[in-house]
């Protein structure tokens, strides 16, 4: 009797743990336990469960175990369902928060439009349409919109740390520099053509002169004079080619807005010094009267060239590197523009998953170009710091420049695919308008971030 009372207490304790929602199903549970009672003898016989002193099966223990099992399974099911419900509710709240945040940001943009004296009606119409679209966004699209905004914000921060323009050059000076480059390019091509012509005539004269040997005939004397004249022409044309090559680099430095005024002035001053050296060597060649003087003039030009050759490569590399740096900055600006375009398409409920993948590839190529560009900058700095520019360092820097250039070319190809995909998704207009009021929107977003940080 004591055993039975003890078991009843246990059963009552377990039953007290059953939630009301589960307790109402006890009939089914009892039915199951009834089945257990009807087959109790067989179960005990096969499993060797305990019996009481009279040898009969302890049915109460079996019943208690069955009830506990049912309670455990049903409780787990209820908890699992509750977890899913909690997650769903959290997602709905998060999506609503995103919609509200985006709406508030657009309203701030409207206020900024007015403060800056822009057309208030135009501002309101532009953002009103977007605000209405955001209200209708699905929870999934709202979450995607937030991720796009996060990426855009991060890219804007990166962009601010980059040098947009090292200096501003007046339009007239810029045009003059470009004209000087075109002229130097033309002069270089002309000097090279004259050099080849003089070289061909010199070789022809040299062949004829070889037949004279030690002959002192009038014809042989004329051939000697002609050979000297052709040699002087070759030297003069060689000097002109070097000078015009330097002029091309100088013009590029003058028009490069991605270089600081100090960097450009330093390169230009160095080039002017090198041009003077070559001009002096050219004057020596033109003034030569004897064969020995021509040979000496040739040595002077050669030595001057060897002295400045690596320096010219370093200067040209620095100019090109600055240009690539400018292209990278513009590409970073394009990244932000593409994110703005995705933002507008997502607001319209357009699935931009495929385009986002292409943009990720585009961004990766720009990052590769930036890494190579920065490596080239470091190598050029090392080369510049040396007393005489190190050809190996310059070669390494040129290799990094080539890598940066190749990455930018790959990015350009991906960009074509992005534009094509945007057109297919109906986002061509959004891409064209992505820069419109962009500054206002970014400023509104910055204010929102500052406020959030202060609240935190």
Image: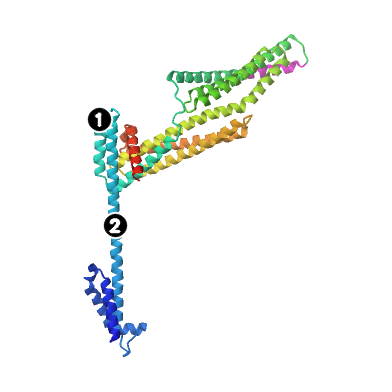
Left or right of 345: which side holds 394? right
Mark 2, other Cα within 10 Å: few <14 / some 14–19 / many ≥20: few
Q: Name the element at disc 2.
A: helix
Residues in magenta? 199-213
Q: Is residue 201 magenta?
A: yes
Main SS category, magenta section: helix
Location of the N terminus (image quadrant): bottom left
Q: Is residue 281 magenta?
A: no
- Residue 335, horizontal then vertical, whole percent: 40, 37
- Residue 203, horizontal then vertical, whole percent: 67, 19
| 12, above or below 160, in the image | below
Q: Quadrant of residue 240?
A: top right
Q: What mark, if any, has residue 86 been given in the picture?
A: 2
- Residue 282, horizontal then vertical, whole percent: 64, 16
| Residue at the outermost right position | 214
Count of residue discs: 2
> Quick one: label 2 or label 1, which is nearer the N terminus?
2
Q: Name the element at disc 1.
A: helix
Q: Nearer the viewer, residue 250 or 290?
A: 250
Left or right of 257: which side holds 128? left
- Residue 53, horizontal then vertical, whole percent: 33, 89
Q: Does the image show residue 311?
A: yes
| Residue at the outermost top position | 218
Mark 1, other Cα within 10 Å: few <14 / some 14–19 / many ≥20: some
Q: CA distance from mark 2 to mark 1?
A: 43 Å
Which residue occupies 35% across, 40% down?
450
Which residue occupies 67% across, 13% down?
229
Q: What mark, if any, has residue 120 been given in the picture?
A: 1
């Amino acid at each position: 009797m004591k055993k039975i009372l003890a078991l009843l207490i246990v059963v009552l304790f377990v039953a007290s743990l059953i939630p009301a929602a589960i307790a109402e199903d006890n009939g089914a549970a009892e039915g199951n336990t009834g089945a257990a009672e009807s087959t109790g003898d067989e179960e005990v016989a096969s499993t060797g469960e305990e019996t009481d002193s009279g040898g009969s099966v302890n049915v109460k223990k079996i019943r208690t175990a069955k009830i506990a099992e049912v309670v455990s399974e049903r409780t787990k099911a209820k908890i699992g369902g509750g977890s899913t419900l909690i997650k769903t509710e959290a997602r709905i709240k998060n999506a609503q928060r995103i919609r509200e945040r985006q709406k508030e940001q657009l309203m701030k943009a409207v206020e900024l439009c007015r403060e800056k004296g822009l057309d208030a009606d135009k501002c309101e119409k532009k953002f009103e349409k977007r605000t209405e679209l955001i209200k209708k966004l699905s929870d999934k699209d709202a979450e995607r919109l937030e991720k796009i905004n996060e990426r855009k914000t991060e890219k804007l921060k990166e962009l601010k740390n980059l040098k947009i323009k090292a200096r501003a050059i007046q339009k007239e000076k810029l045009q003059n520099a470009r004209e000087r480059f075109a002229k130097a390019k033309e002069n270089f091509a002309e000097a090279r053509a004259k050099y080849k012509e003089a070289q061909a005539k010199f070789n022809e004269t040299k062949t004829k002169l070889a037949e004279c040997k030690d002959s002192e005939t009038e014809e042989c004397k004329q051939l000697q004079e002609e050979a000297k004249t052709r040699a002087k022409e070759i030297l003069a044309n060689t000097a002109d080619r070097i000078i015009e090559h330097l002029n091309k680099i100088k013009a590029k430095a003058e028009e490069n807005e991605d270089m600081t005024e100090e960097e450009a002035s330093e390169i230009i001053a160095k080039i002017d010094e090198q041009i003077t050296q070559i001009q002096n060597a050219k004057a020596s060649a033109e003034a030569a009267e004897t064969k020995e003087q021509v040979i000496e003039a040739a040595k002077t030009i050669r030595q001057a060239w060897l002295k400045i050759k690596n320096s010219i490569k370093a200067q040209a590399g620095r100019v090109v590197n600055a240009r690539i740096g400018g292209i990278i900055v513009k590409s970073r600006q394009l990244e932000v523009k593409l994110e703005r375009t995705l933002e507008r398409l997502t607001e319209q409920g357009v699935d931009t998953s495929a385009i986002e993948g292409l943009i990720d590839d585009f961004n990766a190529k720009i990052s590769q170009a930036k890494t190579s560009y920065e490596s080239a900058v470091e190598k050029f700095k090392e080369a510049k710091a040396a007393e005489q520019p190190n050809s190996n360092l310059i070669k390494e820097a040129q290799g990094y420049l080539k890598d940066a250039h190749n990455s930018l070319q790959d990015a350009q190809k991906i960009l074509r695919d992005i534009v094509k995909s945007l057109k297919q998704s109906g986002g061509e207009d959004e891409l064209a308008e992505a820069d419109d009021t962009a500054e206002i929107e970014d400023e509104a977003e910055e204010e929102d971030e500052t406020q959030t940080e202060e609240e935190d």
